[in-house]
Image (cartoon, rainbow, N blue to C red):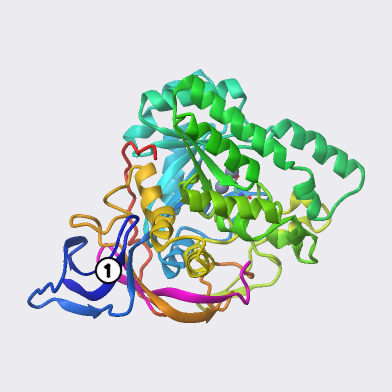
Amino acid sequence: MILIKGGTLITASETFEADILIDGEKIREIGRDLRADGAETVDARGKYVLPGGVDPHTHFDLEMFNTVSSDDHYTGHKAAAFGGTTTVIDFVVHEAQGFRYSVERWFEKAEKAAIDYSFHMNLTHFNEDVARELPSLVEMGITSIKVFMAYNGRLRLSDGAIFQAMRIAKEHGMLTMLHAENGDVIEVLVAEALRAGHTEPVWHARTRPGWGAVEAALRGFALAAESGAPLYLVHMNMAGEVDMLEYARRRGLPVMGETCPQYLFFTEEDLLRPDGAKWICSPPMRSKADNARLWEGLKQGVLQTIGTDHCPFFYDGTKPILYEGQEVAIPGKELGKDDFTKIPNGLPGVQDRMPVLWTEGVVKGRLTPNQFVAYTSTNPARIFGLYPRKGALVPGADADIVIWDPNRRVTYGVALSHQRTDYNLYEGWELTGYPEKVFLRGNLIVDGEKWLGRRGMGRFLKRGEGEVL
Ligand code: URP
Ligand code: ZN
Ligand code: ZN
């Protein structure tokens, strides 16, 4: 047994002083002045105690753009843990051979899991067979599907297919997640840009218009209204999307939204830098006004979660980095040095999320500590059917616990990051407040800068029906 003594507990709704008694993998008791004979005591006086983070949006070991995302289900999990996240939900690619085959492939990739994990299913094609097979995902514990209104010819589904998938999802207690951009307009603009000889990273943003995301979000909400199916808008980057979400929620629609740290801090201007490829992801960064409206949407509770869309690539994959003493080089952003459409889309962030948001959100007064916990842990757990096993500090919950040192100051960047890539978006940022100890089901896996976790110790989480928040 482990007794965490004297900390200030922060949950999604309360802040209070209490001790936590961990018995094996579970929280046994929470209260003042707890005693337990023989328990190992952890002194948390002057520290905050939070439920482990739940990142609802990661892409580990994902083959795309003639390469693969550079964190796998071990390195990405380890990085997540150092940032205070103990559960991740990754996206399975839906292959022509069907759901079971696709999920098996992801289980093989995740054999090295170091924290607990679950899967969403990316729906990349739709027909009668897929419709018939969809409910089998629930038996596998996968109760969420992602559909795409962009990536024509690859992942894009027609509105009709999305509508049908949403109806089936609703009938079987599953949540539909939407990538909202206008695929047709993107296709036209990309072809025009390439014909005109534009090769630079900023054309990635210029060919993916923000209004396309806004109208696609509203289109998705209209499908939710017509089908009655809940919808979760992933990686929101536009002020207009927040407005649409607010509009739809005010009218009682079962719709929810996620943003990611990159959309709160960066803009299209970053793509104009000489190393602008580092900021390429889909959807792209927008403007300062969009950053501000997203922060406002979080403060007002219009949005429900902050995920990462962690999908890292090397900036220069021709030069190896050292990871756990081994040289590693994985082709990355340099693949698109002569053509912006060949720059792998995606960014690192799974470790950065909580430390960066604590300083920029809580310390700077944009979020309350309880909102921080709600957005990074409790709400994703509730929405995706993991609560109260995850995302909660209550007796009976998994003992996924972060002891957070509010006074620790760090200069953040690659030197502190365990993300397996050669750059960090927050290089040189001064952070105040950082995870000190991280427990996964009662096991201490991060102790300061020490890694005590292991490959294979992460468990697959079969999920049930989630809540509409
Ligand atoms: O650029 C990104 N985000 N890559 C991952 C794919 C997606 O649409 O989430
Ligand atoms: Zn997406
Ligand atoms: Zn994604």
Magenta region, residue range: 424-447
User: Which quadrant is the N terminus positioned in?
Assistant: bottom left
Q: Is residue 275 visible?
A: yes
Horizontally, is 128 left or right of 442 in the view?
right
* Percent coordinates x, y for residue 440 in the rendering: 31, 64
Amino acid carrying mark 1 in the image: Asn
At x 27% / y 49%, what residue is drawn?
388
Query: Is residue 433 rendered magenta in the image?
Result: yes
Is the C terminus in the top left, top right, bottom left or bottom right quadrant?
A: top left
Q: Is residue 149 visible?
A: no
Q: x%, y% of residue 372?
A: 43, 59
User: To which residue does mark 1 refer?
Assistant: 443
Considering the whole magenta stretch, tell me its main secondary structure: strand
91 on left or right of 383: right
Residue at 69 percent of width and 59 percent of height: 279
Q: Is residue 76 above or below residue 59?
A: below
Return the residue found at the far right. 196
